[in-house]
Image: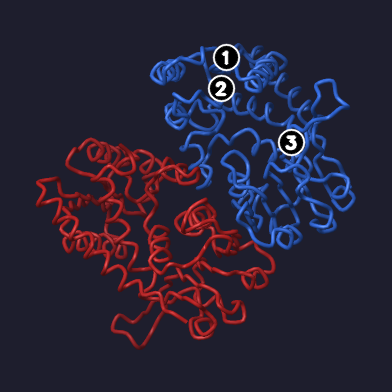
Chain colours: A blue, B red
Amino acid sequence: MQLIDGKKVSDEIKQELAKEVEMLKNAGKKIPHLAAVLVGNDGPSETYVNNKVKACEQTGFVSTLLRFDETITEKFLLEQVERLNTDKDIDGFIVQLPLPPQINEHKVIEAIDPRKDVDGFHPVNIGRTVIGMPAYISATPAGIMELVRRYKIETSGKHCVVVGRSNIVGRPMSILMSLKNYPGDATVTVCHSRTHNMKEIVMRADIIIAAIGRPGFITGDMVKDGAVVIDVGTTRVKSDQTKSGFRLRGDVYFESVAPKCSFITPVPGGVGPMTIVSLLMNTLKAAKKEIYF
Amino acid sequence: MQLIDGKKVSDEIKQELAKEVEMLKNAGKKIPHLAAVLVGNDGPSETYVNNKVKACEQTGFVSTLLRFDETITEKFLLEQVERLNTDKDIDGFIVQLPLPPQINEHKVIEAIDPRKDVDGFHPVNIGRTVIGMPAYISATPAGIMELVRRYKIETSGKHCVVVGRSNIVGRPMSILMSLKNYPGDATVTVCHSRTHNMKEIVMRADIIIAAIGRPGFITGDMVKDGAVVIDVGTTRVKSDQTKSGFRLRGDVYFESVAPKCSFITPVPGGVGPMTIVSLLMNTLKAAKKEIYF
């Protein structure tokens, strides 16, 4: 069993990104610039956005944080989005979700210029991904693909079972893994809350991507010997062993599953650390105009 | 075994559409207007476009056919698309594919205003479909969904195996069938050219959607008793029994598969007749501004 060390890979990628920024600087070129919009004072959102800004600093990216009161109108936010769309210095930007209830999230996301949509949530980027065109892929799926790539995990012709069909993980993973590509070219099954005989289906998987948001849902008896297991779950559960009073638990019951795997991602330290570097990689692509030209 | 009669259903829908057009006319409202762009003299493309225009006439829709020489430039075609985008009388339009080699198809499709993209090929409409937002769904998948709906076939929690991952059928069907919806909510497996143990996988299906383009690929020994079989294959094969010298063959070996099915679509007369009425249904939605407002 080999542990997929997302922390180590993300650190390596940060170093690679820092090197690339250094080269751009030395060549007199523009430094990638990521802007983040944060509306209101949602605790987890603040943490996420701060971590994104911090990662920009670590790698030498320019970052801008725009904070707005939670009482702003949709119209006001759409104007800010438009301003960011046309600001030539900003290569990519994100609007941190969730937004307050007076604002339609879909409308805001569709207002973002797809060329600057480094979160990959705009329908144009999702649609382009589906038909195999160049596109920004959102952070978590892109991070998983990068882990699979860096650990040289075989995917072609493998049976990949994706547990969960959320718009941000399960759905895009099921699409990406079945595209004619590497990683990809897998036979993919999507399971979800309505799936009968879940155990039977998961047991046939060569690759399991667990993204259903139920701590410990995948147990050892559901996993075939030699399977690759990617755990995307990050549920906060109470714990008396941490200072904060909680800890993160994955969708995989690690203790019983790990001994059967060829590869497995731990939680924390697996997929989680990859999301922010994926966002930075997208921002670099935006700065280099690799997706849209 | 019940035959899914696409010819009959499509005739019923045409009558429903004609009635609706009549009502719009009587209410003094605008009649739905579909425009089709045909570049060059590709035989099958001419037939398709002519059939679309004919279906418009049968149902009382207004139609406009724009024909251009196969030597036109990409720039010229993009200008025509822009003209159709801004033409207030036209509710929806299609650019018949394939296009001649000097023209980038993706570029042309992305130039179409998603609000008029009744073919549902624009990445915005694909992306919106993926995340469960209102969108135009392309003709063949929309036609299959309509057949499933009209025959009241149960899909929730069923195992649906989609054979083929093309952008126009396999891929969208795999997405639609796994969305939280009816038809949908199925556990979906996508198989394709790289899939190992195809037979074993197809045998587990409650619903088989065959869209791989290989005549007679699905045989009786691959099908579970009571399965629903949707055959999307339409390969022209030589025949000495037809005037034209060829006939259409599906991906399903009908003779051996049909006796095992609960429902099956024949070829021809199954999915085929549904595609054009789906296009008209999308055009009506465009005229009524049901998807985008």
Q: Amino acid at mark 2?
A: Ala
From mark 1 to mark 3, how far is it between C-alphas?
A: 30 Å
Q: CA distance from mark 2 to mark 1?
A: 8 Å
* Mark 1 residue crowding within 10 angstroms, few (<14) / some (14–19) / many (20+): some
Helix, strand, or loop for circle 3? Answer: loop
Residue drawn 33% across and 39% down? B292
Q: Tag 2 or tag 3, which sits nearer the N-term?
A: 3
Residue, disc 1 = A30
Q: Chain of mark 2?
A: A
Residue B16 drawn above or below residue A9: below
Q: Residue at x 39, y 53 (%)?
A: B138
> In the rendered structure, the residue with mark 1 lies on which chain?
A
- The circle on residue A287 is 2
Q: Quadrant of residue B19?
A: bottom left
A129 vs B232, left or right, is right
- x and y, in percent, of residue B70 in the image: 28, 52
Q: Are marks 3 and 2 in contact (CB under 8 Å)?
A: no
The kind of secondary structure element at disc 1 is: loop
Q: Residue furthest bottom?
A: B241
Specify the amino acid type for callout 3: Val
Horizontal and vertical percent position of residue B107: 39, 40
Q: Which residue is disc 3 drawn over?
A: A271
Mark 3 and mark 2: span between their CA atoms?
A: 25 Å
* B226 versus B68 height, above or below: below
Sequence-earlier tag: 1 or 3: 1
Of badges 3 and 2, nearer the viewer stands: 3
Nearer to me, B237 or A47: A47
